[in-house]
Image (cartoon, helix red, strand yellow):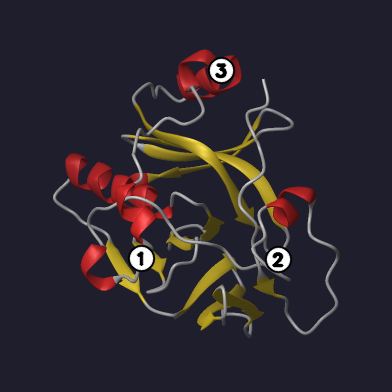
Amino acid sequence: MDRFRPLRRIQVDPEPAAAAPPPPAAAAANGGAGEDVSAAPAAGLLMASRVRRRSAVYRDCKGDYIGVPNDPCLTKILSKQGDNKVLFADKVLKFTQSGKMKRRILVITDFALYLVDPDADILKRRIALAAVDKLCISKLSDNFFAIIVPTEYDCLIASTRKKEIVDIIIKAIKSNSEYQPQVASSNRFEYHAAAEVIKEVEFEEAEGGVKTRITHKAKAKS
């Protein structure tokens, strides 16, 4: 079963250094030259501060878009961690420390987030919801969001279901504690791509969509 059909087209302005051609999934996801992302779906917690396409407001939210119970690899990964309540599952693009885009399956349970390599059927990362401090998003119709994890390193993801993902993460954390993570809405934010690697993501409205630029910042001081 092809669990990872290509996302919408993406466009991101590369850093000044020459970059390798984007992987096939990124090219298929692109809405123009480079790596820009289109609108995020679903209505919910963040409507007041965001500029959205009308279709994003009325798109259905069903949570599991992969069919986790029917996927032996995913069910085995969750079972090993003692997780069985799936709140969300879908294909996403994850940005690496070097700026490359990697295809991943994002699974959210009531206790953690899982990033799985769909080609190798390998769990690449597990983030406990209790470790999530903040979520960074823009005020425009892009598909990027950053999960800020101070005790580890952060994670920049692109998904056409960004709005739904952010809402689910917030609700899952609130259901397990009195804590609610901050949602920082700005057209420019920073994240740690690695412990000592800081990157800045900047968004700008452009003809036909949103122009997104990711730049490398100075290393964080130890």
Tag 2 residue: 99
Residue occupying image coordinates x 67% and y 33%:
118
> Which quadrant holds residue 147?
bottom left
Q: Quadrant of residue 17?
A: bottom right
Q: Is residue 17 left or right of residue 79?
A: right
Q: Residue at x 34, y 71 (%)?
A: 51
> Measured along the vertical axis of the image, is residue 76 above or below residue 183?
above
Report how far apart the C-alphas of labels 2 and 1 lie in the structure: 27 Å
The residue located at (43%, 54%) in the rendering is: 162
Q: Earlier in the sequence, mark 1 or mark 3?
A: 1
| Nearest to the observer: residue 89 or residue 75 | 89
10 Å neighbourhood of mark 1: few (<14), some, or many (≥20)?
some
Identity, as a three-letter code, of the amino acid under mark 2: Gly
Residue 157 at what x, y percent from top left? 54, 56
Residue 193 spot, x, y in % from top left: 60, 66
Give the percent coordinates (x, y) of residue 112: 39, 39
The local secondary structure at tag 3 comes to loop
**Measured along the vertical axis of the image, is residue 60 above or below residue 162?**
above
Residue placed at 42% from the left, 73% from the top? 140
Q: Which residue is mark 1?
A: 52
Crowd class of label 3 (few under 14; some 14 to 19; many from 20; radius 10 Å): few
Query: Which of pointers 2 and 3 lies earlier in the amino acid sequence?
Result: 3
Quote the CA–CA distance across marks 1 and 3. Answer: 33 Å
Q: Earlier in the sequence, mark 2 or mark 1?
A: 1
Work out whether residue 21 or residue 199 is closer to the camera in this orientation and state it. 21
Q: Nearer the viewer, mark 2 or mark 1?
A: 1
Residue 101 appears in the figure: yes
Mark 2 → mark 3, Cα distance in angstroms? 29 Å
- For the residue pair 112 and 41, the one nearer the viewer reads as 41
**Label 3, on which residue?**
71
Crowding at dot 2, Cα within 10 Å, few <14 / some 14-19 / many 20+, comes out as: some
Q: Quadrant of the C terminus?
A: bottom right
